[in-house]
Amino acid sequence: MLEFLTQAGAHAAGFGGPADMWAAIVNDFSNITEPAAFAAFLQVLMIDLVLAGDNAIVVGALAAGLPAEQRKKVILIGVIAALVLRIAFALVVTQLMQIVGLIFVGGLLLVWVAWKMWRELRHTGQSHGSPEIAGDEHSGLKPAKSFAGAAWAVAVADVSMSLDNVLAVAGAAREHPGILIVGLIFAVALMGLAANIIAKYIERYRWIAYLGLAVIVYVAVKMIYEGWVDPGVGVGTLFG
């Protein structure tokens, strides 16, 4: 699994192999005391923490209406799907961000993500929650009524949240490929190992979620601006 993640990180940054990937990581982290690199690293960590917890809460809420055995299967499917999707999106994110206008569109997508998070944070919730996931009773989501319905809803949510996560990390660390690689691997590790723990602390200490929301808004605005003015892939180049 670790080797696969290493290869995924290498491809995500467009490198030839693990040696090049490691060189980029060493290069960025040897300069981590520089304000730009340190700020990018902190942004990546906060985005990964908040979106991993949010992913767990959404999956738990959607599965909450099912019997215990089916509920556990849906949650397991949700976690595995999120892992696979994050790796899949990581493989192509840097190449995709070379397409004219995609950084701008990614920024707009993150604005929508931020709005959705804001509404969820202020919502009283409709799900009674699942015992497996802490805090999902305050998600603002209605639980699915069937196994097929829950599995489909989780799959759709995972696609959206995995793309959100990878885009946000790529936007925050765009000029620092080593930090981008570490951030993508960290996102996968958090989703697989600690998403429920993170969800519990986000529910207990709501300021963590609001801080994460602020970081996502900042990254979204930065991506929209750079996606317009970038001389290579900015939308502004289409208008001369």
Image (cartoon, rainbow, N blue to C red):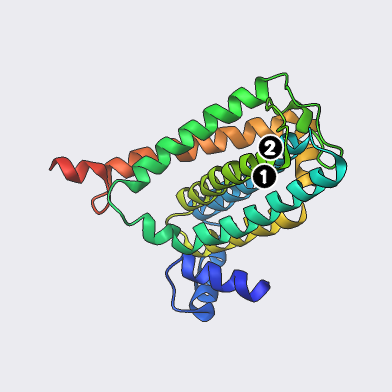
| Label 1: which secondary element | helix
In the image, residue 171 sits, relative to residue 179, either above or below, namely above
What residue would you read off at disc 2? 58
Residue at 47 percent across and 32 percent down: it is 111
Residue at 74 percent across and 47 percent down: it is 74
> Which quadrant of the figure has residue 198?
top right
Q: Residues within 10 Å of mark 1 (few under 14, many from 20)?
A: many
Asked if residue 19 can be seen in this view, the reply is yes
Residue 79 placement (x, y as % from top left): 70, 52
Q: Residue type at mark 1?
A: Ala
- Residue closer to the observer: 104 or 138: 138
In the image, residue 7 sits, relative to residue 40, either above or below, namely below
Question: The N terminus lies in which quarter of the figure?
Answer: bottom right
* Earlier-in-chain disc, 2 versus 1: 2
> Disc 2 and disc 1: Cα gap in Å?
12 Å
Question: The C terminus lies in which quarter of the figure?
Answer: top left
Query: How many numbered marks are there?
Result: 2
In the image, residue 94 sits, relative to residue 136, either above or below, namely below
Disc 2 vs disc 1: which is toward the camera?
1
What residue would you read off at disc 1? 151
Residue at 87 percent across and 38 percent down: it is 131
Residue 122 placement (x, y as % from top left): 66, 20
In the displayed structure image, the side of residue 153 where residue 75 appears, left or right: right
Residue at 69 percent across and 27 percent down: it is 142
Residue 196 placement (x, y as % from top left): 78, 45
Q: Residue type at mark 2?
A: Val
| Label 2: which secondary element | helix
In the displayed structure image, the side of residue 169 where residue 142 appears, left or right: right
In the displayed structure image, the side of residue 91 where residue 81 appears, left or right: right
Residue 137 placement (x, y as % from top left): 78, 28
